[in-house]
Amino acid sequence: MIIVTGANGFIGSALVWELNQAGREDVVCVDTVLLKERDDLLKNRRYHQFLGKDQIWSFLQSSEAIKSVEAILHMGACSSTTETNVAFLNENNVEYTRRLWKWCTDYRKPYIYASSAAVYGDGSRGFDDALPTSTFTPLNPYGESKAAFDRWAELQTETPPLWLGLRFFNVFGPNEYHKGFMASVPFKAYGQIRDTGRLSLFRSHNPDYQDGKQMRDFVYVKDITRWMVELMKRRDCRSGIYNMGFGKARTWLDLANAVFKTMEREPAIDWIDVPMEMRPRYQYFTEAKMDRLLALGVSSPQWPLEKAIDDYVRNYLSTPQISYL
């Protein structure tokens, strides 16, 4: 039995899909958003049961859980980079994660949890997952909440038999449709181009980068979920924190041109200013250092940007009704 928290969210529901693809249906789905509030993400999935965020604690004390749970894959958290309520972030991104860590420690269960590339801040100190988390200074309360747990985890002497903190970079793909402002640029770009034939991108306010040449490490959700299932199967991994990106930074223009091409439209881009309040926190370059993750024996990235955009647009976004995994 496998527990997936955040199962009614973007990466969590995609992970349940990946587990189903691997023949696993003995999944306990956990989320703060109940099925009666959002039923699309898991409607095609097969799982053992669904629990609310706080129902998990009584379940974990049951003999069924203690005997049968193989691992906890903790994707549940506040994922909004604009959240400013520090107490809320601490409760959801730090304390909840610690409680699950303790259970996995007590009952000797592997524990995989979602960290974030937001830990790296402005990127001036690089994106090296081999360095202590204290090396980096996040730019917002969300990033600080993720860094706070990573720093805590690195100091622990009592740990689960295997623990992995996964720092996701710019993840995009099917099942993110509910995320609104926090949805990926590929998703937003498709909607803008479909509706207007044009796409708005931020111009550069940094002389080192031309407009549209700002760079991000875009990673398709299908790479992310495949890696997590591969890691769950391996019990000889070295515990620690690992990056999860494609490993190669690409420009916003690369992304835009890929979406226009898949949609068979001529590129038409409008340049807009980065809002003043965002400029101190705006990142011009991110790129995951992937050596340590690949050294664990997981597969190489399989979804370069153009291939991923083509799959996302053709097989999910432009279908008669938007498609889910």
Image (cartoon, rainbow, N blue to C red):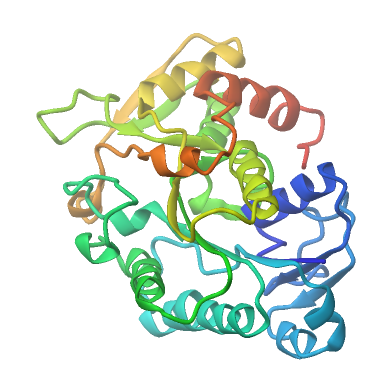
**Residue sitting nearer the eye, 60 or 268:** 60
Q: Is residue 27 left or right of residue 80?
A: right
The residue at 36%/31% (across/down) is 201
Quarter occupied by residue 155: bottom left
The residue at 22%/56% (across/down) is 277
The residue at 78%/72% (across/down) is 69
**Residue sitting nearer the eye, 189 or 69:** 69
Above or below 305: residue 89: below
Q: Is residue 261 left or right of residue 62?
A: left
* Percent x, y of residue 30: 73, 71
Q: Quadrant of the C terminus?
A: top right
Q: Is residue 136 left or right of residue 258?
A: left
Q: Quadrant of the N terminus?
A: bottom right
Q: How many marks?
A: 0
Quarter occupied by residue 57: bottom right
* Percent x, y of residue 105: 58, 80
The residue at 20%/49% (across/down) is 279
Q: Is residue 209 left or right of residue 84?
A: left
Above or below 178: residue 285: above
* Percent x, y of residue 53: 68, 79
Query: Furthest residue to the front?
Result: 236
